Amino acid sequence: MTSSDRADGLLPGWDADDGTPQQSRQVPPPPGTFGLRIRTVTEVSRAIRETVRADERLRDVWVEGEIGRVTISSAGHAYFALKDERAQLQCVWFRDDRVRSPFQPQTGLRVVAHGRVDVFEPQGALQLYVEALQPAGFGDLAIRFEQLKARLQAEGLFDVARKRRLPVRPAVIAVVTSPSGAVWRDVCHVLARRWPLARVLLVACQVQGDAAPASIVGALRRIERWVDEAADAGGAADTPAVTILARGGGSLEDLWAFNDERVVRAVVAHRLPVVCGVGHEVDVTLADFAADVRAPTPSAAAELVVPDRAEVAAAVRGARGRLDDAVLRAMAAPRRELVAERRALDALHPAARLAQSRERAGVLLDRATRAATARLGAARTADERLATRLPGLATGRTTRARAAIDASRAALAALAPQATLDRGYAIVRRRADGSIVRDPIEAPAGTALEVRLARGEVGATVDAEA
């Protein structure tokens, strides 16, 4: 028996020979192993994991059994064991898959789990990684559900890229449901409370039983025909803008009509955006995956298709406030310019200019009056000061003038002819012409003279020349 005849990972007998020549060995065996190939725990665990993953049967399995002790980790993952009379299988259900499921594991329940088998290498544990969980009584329906879901998903019917956006404020809303159930009244109540402007159109159909799938498909097609006819007649504004597919809660069998392939394909092909509100929040149907928007309940579906009028009113008030602020900001600069222009025009008005000239004249008159008053006051003050000084000045000047006159008189008296006469001198004149004789030549002999003395005159005659 050679190494190629043994399963990979199994140890041969202690005295087995693998037939490999000694000279072809590249690495000598460790001491004490007797030539055997010793594998690590990681290698063995990895070999088991690869073997399990290579088995197609373990990639997608349905397992029925009784749930043992259930543990929920702090991360939200569920750990439990599925067991029967002879064996048990450890299971892991991750949080994202668990919270979407309407059914939760409980100890002692018999269930059907769908998932894949794999090895958790760090612990070497063989585990079932659960993707969906159903009570064992519904195992067949669950299998049919998952098979149809996988097939339709592979066709791309559930792709997010094909989902359409809902209209913001639809004027007309079509509701596909039973007219006799509470769902219709709940939907109308929610729409009237949130957005009473919308018109609601009931498209009646069966929502349970064998005839329900065909009835639902027929209702969706009636809406499309009505939209086409209204568009041809020019009344497209009165046609529905969105469709609500709704039904109340129930068991998986009660809701099975919404898992019918015909219904799923009709929802995908529907002309209008579809909001699916079937069952309660924990109920999931294939119509939910096919719809453009899934709502947890029919009432929630009605809330999704219309806005809340209170929120819209608040938004309008906020927008009005912002618009008022924007208008005020936009008008502030033109208002300032207008005020400036008005002031400029007022300043150029004849009455304004006349008032300005009058005011300027008044100012100038006031200024001139103040200047004249100031100058008169200054002159009066100077006059008063001069008047105070004038007597002293006049007396001084008079005294000085008198002294000067006296001095002049004294000087004049000293220089006057009389003073000379008083000193014994005389003035001699020719009597004929009255001229003063300064030289004897001027008075030849016989010339009659008049001699003026200090106290009178005497006559004389020249006797002979000297």
Image (cartoon, rainbow, N blue to C red):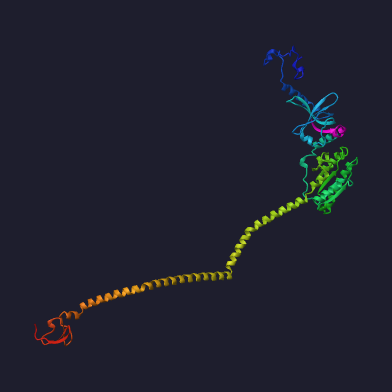
Q: Residue at x 75, y 53 (%)?
A: 313
234 or 57, nearer to the observer = 57
Number of numbered discs visible in the structure rendering: 0
Q: Residue 130: percent from the left, percent from the top?
A: 80, 31
427 or 223, nearer to the observer = 427
Q: Residue 112: percent from the left, percent from the top?
A: 84, 31
Farthest residue, direction top: 15
Residue range highlighted in magenta: 129-143
Asked if residue 321 lies in the magenta stretch, the reply is no
Q: Relative to 342, is 146 above or below?
A: above
380 or 10, nearer to the observer = 380
Q: Residue 318: percent from the left, percent from the top?
A: 71, 52
Q: Residue at x 79, y 26 (%)?
A: 55
Q: Residue at x 80, y 51 (%)?
A: 195
Viewport quadrant of the N terminus = top right
Quadrant of the image occupied by residue 76: top right
361 or 205, nearer to the observer = 361
